[in-house]
Every structure is written in C-alpha cells, then in structure tokens.
Image (cartoon, grey):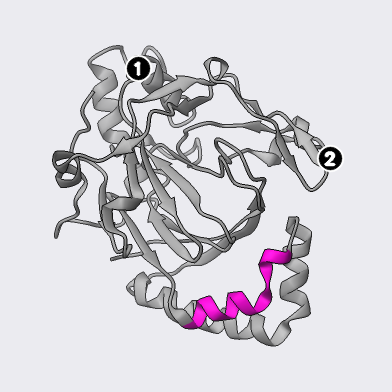
Amino acid sequence: MKIKRGIILHNQFSEGSESIFINSGVIHHTQQLHENVNFNGIVFKPNFEKDAYLPKRDWRKLSVEEIKILQSNKKRNDSNTICLGEIPDDLKKLYQNLKLSDCNNRDEIFAKFRENEKTTIELNTSMANFLMTLSNNKPFKIHFLGSNFPNLEVVACDTTILPKGYTEKDMKFLGIHNDGTQYVSTYKLHKSGNRLTINLGNQDRYFFFINITLTQVLNMLKEKISIKEHEIDITNIAKYFFKYFPDYPVIKIKQKPYQYYIAPTDNCFHDGSTLGNTALDMIIVYFGAFQF
C-alpha cells in the first residue's frame, strides 16, 4: 500500500532523508518473535496489550516519490507536521557535563540532576530559552524525564494501571498507538498541540509514526465499517485501523543523541523503539504547541 499525503516532515537533520525508513505495515504482536531484554541484571521477555500491533521489520530507504509526499510546505502547523532537529550546542554541552551515560536506571538519572545543581539551573534556563524560540509565545511544560530499557521493539507502556511494586514482567507494551484522553473527540485531536522529545542517551533510538491524521484514519475506516455501530473513539481506533489496513506503511526515524522530534502524538499513530541497543534509553519530553 502506498502512503497518502497527510502528516508531513520538516526535516532539519544534517543527514537528511538518510535517517528515514519505511516498511510495508504492521503485524500483530503474537506473530512477531521477541528477544529477551537483558540489562543491568534484569532479564525479561516483553509482554504486550491484547490488541498491540508492531511494525514489520522489512525496512528500506524512501523512494523519491515518498520523500515528496512527506516533504513539508508552507501549510505546516503543529497538528500536521513532525519536525526533526538538534538541540543547540550550549544545551548539548550542559547535558554532557551531567554524564548521564553513567546511569543505569531512572533514579540515577534524577540523582545526576540533584548532584549537579548549578548545571541543572543553567540547563533549565537554556532549555526555556530554546523552547521559547519554538513556542510562538504559547505555553509549554515539561511532561517527563524518563528512561526505557534497551532492545525494546516499542517502548510505550501505561504504568499508571500497574499495581504497586510492579516489576518489568508486569509491564504490557501498547504497540503503535495514539495518545489522548477518552474525553476528547477524535475530530478535535488536531487541537491538542504536540510534544518535543529529546534523545539524552548515548545511542541512537527510533521514532515510528504513520503519516496520516486520525481524521484521515476515520475517513478510511468509514469505507470499511460503520463508525457509529462499532463505537470507534480514540481508545480503540488503532485496533480497527490495523485490522482493516495492516499494509499501510510505518515510517521510522533514526534519532541520534541530542536530536529531537516534535510530533502531534494525539493526532497520529506512533511509538518509540530501542531495538538493538545495549545502553539505557534516556529522554526528556515537553508538551506545547511548537511551531517550525
């Protein structure tokens, strides 16, 4: 299946389209072989939600036609565009001074910030200045500073529903999904803003997305089933789309250390990945309505 014109890419990576790949669609998690995660003395095989779908692994470079379909234009905005870029050198040096690469878990990451108060204060100021250049005077806020295990095909997991004292074996990964709350109409998700995610680790990580908005998804599903009868909303739209359109391609972005992406994650299917990595994945995420 060919990709449609929908979510576009404003690519400021120095490597250009060399960091972008495409595949032939998704596969249900039960049909994919999964390796054990083995890191820092913790070994487990990832579990998944019942309706989790994962990208097929037949990645290839984009064709000239596909690059043109994804290419951004003057109509780009915070709901239809994914922006790829790299943080300024002053921010990069401040993060490097923290030596986050020594960390083996989330607690150690937070400890680095507490132990280096002066650097942390400088970081907060510099980061605020940087984000203001992208926010167009609109408010933004930090969402979380977090980590993921290496060698995970997808990283998103709803830890808020897990029991107290849960272990890694209790985690169930979502697969390619959309963000958002059930109290928001699917047709209003284009108003939800976007998020900026920076790779603070010392290895490449990956960002998956499907380049159509959820309004486009609904319109495609209407050709197959009754939206009303199936009560399709933001909690189940991914399941139905992947059931009827498993061959719609997934785009994969290689995100090097200190590179960022800005994406309308409420308005498109997406996830992150650390597959093949051996070091802790570290990210910092901000919510806003960032412009490009």
- N-terminal label among 2 and 1: 2
Instruction: Judge the density around disc 2: few (<14), some (14-19), many (≥20) Cα neighbours within 10 Å.
Output: few
The residue indicated by pointer 2 is: 164
| Marks 2 and 1 close (CB-CB < 8 Å) | no
Magenta-colored span: 90-102
Residue type highlighted by circle 1 = Lys
Q: Quadrant of the image for the N terminus? A: top left
Using the numbered discs, state the Cα–Cα distance from disc 2 to disc 1 in whole angstroms.
37 Å
Q: Position of residue 114 (x, y in %)?
A: 76, 76
The residue positioned 47% from the left and 47% from the top of the image is 206
Q: Quadrant of residue 227?
A: top left
Q: Quadrant of the image for the C terminus? A: bottom left
- Secondary element under disc 1, as helix, strand or loop, is loop
Q: Tell me: 237 left or right of 282.
A: left
The residue positioned 60% from the left and 75% from the top of the image is 96
Pick the residue in front: 231 or 276: 276
Q: Position of residue 183 (x, y in %)?
A: 49, 38
Q: Quadrant of residue 188?
A: top left
Q: Tell me: 258 left or right of 6.
A: right
Picture disc at residue 228: 1
The residue positioned 56% from the left and 32% from the top of the image is 174
Residue type highlighted by circle 2 = Lys
Which of the two marks, 2 or 1, is nearer to us in this view?
2
**Looking at the image, is 172 positioned above or below residue 122?**
above
Asked if residue 213 shows in the view, the reply is no
Q: Name the magenta segment's main secondary structure.
A: helix
